Amino acid sequence: MIREESVYRIGVIGKPHGVKGEVSMSFTDDAFDRVDADYLVLKIEGIFVPFFMEEYRFKSNETALIKFENIDSQERAKELTGCEVFFPRELVQELTDELSWAQIIGFQLVDAQSCDVIGTIVDVDETTINTLFVVEDHQNNELLIPASEEFIKEVDADKKTIKVTLPQGILDLE
């Protein structure tokens, strides 16, 4: 059984492409191209299911066309539309020391001085000039915290924590 903590979200399945079972996938992380993997994990009705890839090709910088094994018709491909796509964390961690933004979703953001947990990273916003961590604190409040290298003191992929030293008062901003 695939557990949520063993994968991270890299995209979503779009509409079928053609009539032979190929699907489009919008992705936020191209780990499936950087790391040798035979399969991707789709979340279907809350269950993580591996789907083995026959082939894939990039349509753009954010879209790939994928042909999964045993998905041989437009009707079968249509059943996958809207499914979230995940990638196994262990495959990426074995081959690279760098984490992508998508991989850190779910990490705890921790104050480096007090060791207090600030919250959980639920998203990374790259739409602004400065990349921001979208963090949910213990009261389910959303905090926007700059993802600046000068603030990040330590990243521990095994413990899924990022220790930061933030400017005074930044957590009080609304």
Image (cartoon, rainbow, N blue to C red):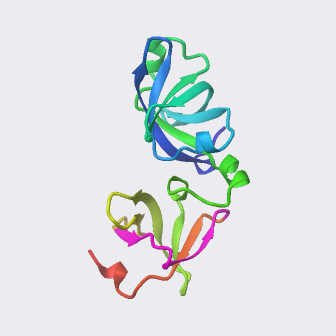
**Number of disc labels:** 0
Q: Quadrant of residue 141?
A: bottom left
Question: Is residue 129 one of those drawn in magenta?
Answer: no
Residue 144 in the image, given as x and y percentages of width and height: 35, 68
Residue at the image point whose x is 41% and y is 69% from the top: 137
Residue 118 at what x, y percent from top left? 46, 74
State yes or no: residue 153 in magenta.
yes
**Residue 47, above or below 73:** below
Quarter in which the C terminus is drawn: bottom left
The quarter of the picture where residue 128 lies is bottom left
* Residue 85 makes an appearance in the image: yes
Depth check: 100 or 6 in front? 100
Locate the N terminus and report the quarter of the image it occupies: top right
Relative to 104, is 54 above or below? above
x then y, percent, for residue 146: 40, 72
Residue 131 percent location from the top left of the image: 40, 65
Write down the region rendered in magenta. Answer: 143-158
Q: Residue furthest left?
A: 174
Residue 48 in view in this figure:
no
Residue closest to the eye, 18 or 61 = 61
Q: Is residue 144 above or below residue 166?
A: above
For the point 51% across and 38% down, which residue is it?
A: 85
